Image (cartoon, coloured by chain):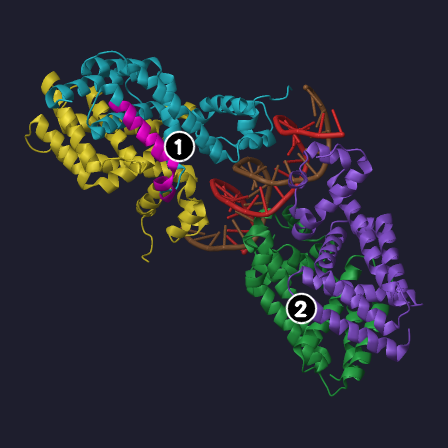
Chain colours: A green, B purple, C cyan, D yellow, E red, F brown
Amino acid sequence: MPKIVDSEQYRKELLHQCFDLLAEKGYANVTTRQLAQFLNISTGALYHYFPSKKALFEQLVEEMSQQDVQMLQAVAAGNKTLPQRVRLLGELLVEREDYFVKQAALFVDFYRHTEIAETLNNPVFERIDQQYQQVMMTVLGLSEPKVARFVWTLINGVLIEQVEGAAGLSFAAQIDLLTDMLIAYFEKHGS
Amino acid sequence: MPKIVDSEQYRKELLHQCFDLLAEKGYANVTTRQLAQFLNISTGALYHYFPSKKALFEQLVEEMSQQDVQMLQAVAAGNKTLPQRVRLLGELLVEREDYFVKQAALFVDFYRHTEIAETLNNPVFERIDQQYQQVMMTVLGLSEPKVARFVWTLINGVLIEQVEGAAGLSFAAQIDLLTDMLIAYFEKHGS
Amino acid sequence: MPKIVDSEQYRKELLHQCFDLLAEKGYANVTTRQLAQFLNISTGALYHYFPSKKALFEQLVEEMSQQDVQMLQAVAAGNKTLPQRVRLLGELLVEREDYFVKQAALFVDFYRHTEIAETLNNPVFERIDQQYQQVMMTVLGLSEPKVARFVWTLINGVLIEQVEGAAGLSFAAQIDLLTDMLIAYFEKHGS
Amino acid sequence: MPKIVDSEQYRKELLHQCFDLLAEKGYANVTTRQLAQFLNISTGALYHYFPSKKALFEQLVEEMSQQDVQMLQAVAAGNKTLPQRVRLLGELLVEREDYFVKQAALFVDFYRHTEIAETLNNPVFERIDQQYQQVMMTVLGLSEPKVARFVWTLINGVLIEQVEGAAGLSFAAQIDLLTDMLIAYFEKHGS
DNA sequence: AATGAATGAGCGTTCATTCAT
DNA sequence: TATGAATGAACGCTCATTCAT
């Protein structure tokens, strides 16, 4: 086994490798031993890179949310009308369905495994929430933060239903419906 | 404490008593001992009424979903236009915010604690999903099952955000926005 | 395995059974699994009776110190001169050498495994220290608390050397020497 | 940082640096990583100089006991009466209270972390014990080895009580009492 | 029907030690 | 010599479940 040269880099690689496992099985349903085995390292090594299971999870969520934001920003480029932007956003989500669904799974776990008292003071939470709100405003060119936030809430609702594997409709079909609804709303109420 | 006459009835009472505790703290964060203590029975007795913690939880989810459906049906009564129905539905949700948010919390837990392979074959899941789809069709007087189903998905998205305690907007404000959006959509695309 | 009827009684029995093992091997060198195995119960049962390994240990120390005090009080009975009392105390210690040596071992562990900050506020510590000082005053009929305390310190020094198995002299010989020293001291300085 | 010329010398320097840390926190409460960090070397380097944590500890105890002996020898110089020697010894102990208390802490840890079976055969133990007995004979000018040995036992008893932080009396006060007691004893029984 | 003591596999985590570099 | 990443057995403890009463 080669000596790790860039330990910071390796830590991020480990995080990325964890993503699928944690998103699919859920934080509470994956043990540190499973995690280590999955990563092909010992439990000791896992704790060499992360101070605790919880910290690993938080780092993962943060890392992924940044990746999210970068992906979504792409929609903002160019001169587009609001309906165009909404459709583009929908297309992006459908294109990367697998990623976004897993990401949503991670978030649900993250929130549920944090004590409510902790939630309010947690800087990670706040930063992430702010980021998503901001990116939705930029992407859709909205002036109302609360509408931007609401759009993200709805998207998450659809994503989470996919997580649960309970969807009667395909993700693409749901995103289509959502797109239509948003466009109808913006046509009627302005942006 | 009255002598137990109808064991079936008593089981349901126990379930109703569990609801708040499990919804607030989450399935994984409540031990069977806590559950038993909360119900003022012994752990042995708990296992007399329910074969396992998981089974108890599934029965609770099922029981509550039926209660949900009954509540929602109320909106369907009388001769109303679609926008009226949508608004009524929104009002009902806001009125009983506490209950519905807890219910959503329960669902999220339920899905996350079930293996994906299990999800697809689980009759409980299917039945519940069908029920919600059905009730939304009735309540809104829709002819399209998939739209009905989707409306419920969106409502759940809003509820789950409240569960997570992460909401930037109040539940009422979000439901208002959702109501407006649905009305705009139906006006444009028909029901 | 019969059901335990008097759980409080059983807890004390478990404590007494632990005594030898913990005194001989030391708190840190006995694992909870070893403890459970030694007691012929499961680790789960151990935690049914004691909230933690540390709590078990503290209860043991307290229980034993009470037993100590009762033993030592016996010397106080009757009308005796100070030298007589000193000799009687020495005889008692030699008679029950095994017990007192183990007890001393326990105490050393107890103090070393408690954070210094904790030591000062710990009610268990204070009570025990007071008890020994008090009992030495009574037993020797001393009016000076600090001398009483000092005598106990010296006795403990001798006991601890036995714990360590490092003694060049037998316990009886050491206690004899100590007795002579104390008598010489009291003859010269009064009691 | 000077280039290491004499590896043996460096090893002893490392030991001396360890002393405070190990005496204050206790063998079991200091990890090899902490030790290495404290010494400004890597864990690998630590294992280059010492075959194991335990061996390091044993070497430390041995090294320190030699230092002890040298300090104590100082009292032997000159033509003094026994009471004078006893008082001088007491003064030395009080002067260097901090050092001797730490030393005692080390010894207690050392003995407790060694299996009893091991204790009896351990050459380190025997050598150290012999040394102290010898030095006490020289220092006090005693002809009886067993009394010399016993005096050291009593001194240790007082030191250990200080280690435990449980002392009702100051170290100086206890040493004063001990001095008086020894003098009274020697006056009565001869040396 | 009901109790609660008992079980033991499994959890997150630690740390003395090793070894490729 | 020296590094520090890697190991993995073992720790204290938890908790769904069982079972003698």
Q: Residues within 10 Å of mark 1 (few under 14, many from 20)?
A: many
Q: Point out which mark residue D16 bears.
A: none
- Tell whether A105 sits left or right of D63: right
Element at badge 1?
helix
Residues packed near mark 2 inside 10 Å, few (<14), some (14 to 19) or many (20 plus): few
- Furthest toward the bottom, the residue is A79
Observer-side mark, 1 or 2, equals 2
**Magenta residue check for B152:** no
Q: Which residue is mark 2?
A: B170
Left or right: residue C37 compared with residue A20: left
Main secondary structure of the magenta stretch = helix
Tell me the residue that label 1 is attached to: C109
Residue E6 lies, in percent from the top left, at 63, 26
Query: Which residue does the image show at 39% across and 32% down from the upper left?
Result: C109
Residue range (magenta): C117-137
Residue A160 position, x and y percent, is 76, 61
Q: Left of B36 or right of it: where is D169?
A: left
Mark 1 to mark 2 CA distance (whole Å): 57 Å
Q: Residue D144 at x, y = what percent?
A: 17, 19
Residue at the spot x=73%, y=79% of the render?
A: A75
The amino acid on which the numbered mark 2 sits, given as a three-letter code, is: Ser
C8 displayed left or right of C79: right
Residue A116, picture quadrant:
bottom right
Establish if B118 lies above or below B77. Answer: above
Q: Is residue C19 shown to the viewer in this render?
A: yes
Task: Please report contact status of discs 1 and 2: CB closer than 8 Å, yes or no.
Answer: no
Give the structural element (helix, strand or loop) at label 2: loop
Q: Chain of mark 2?
A: B
Q: Chain of mark 1?
A: C
Where the C terminus of chain A falls, by quadrant?
A: bottom right
Image coords of residue D131 (percent x, y): 24, 28
- Tally of numbered discs: 2
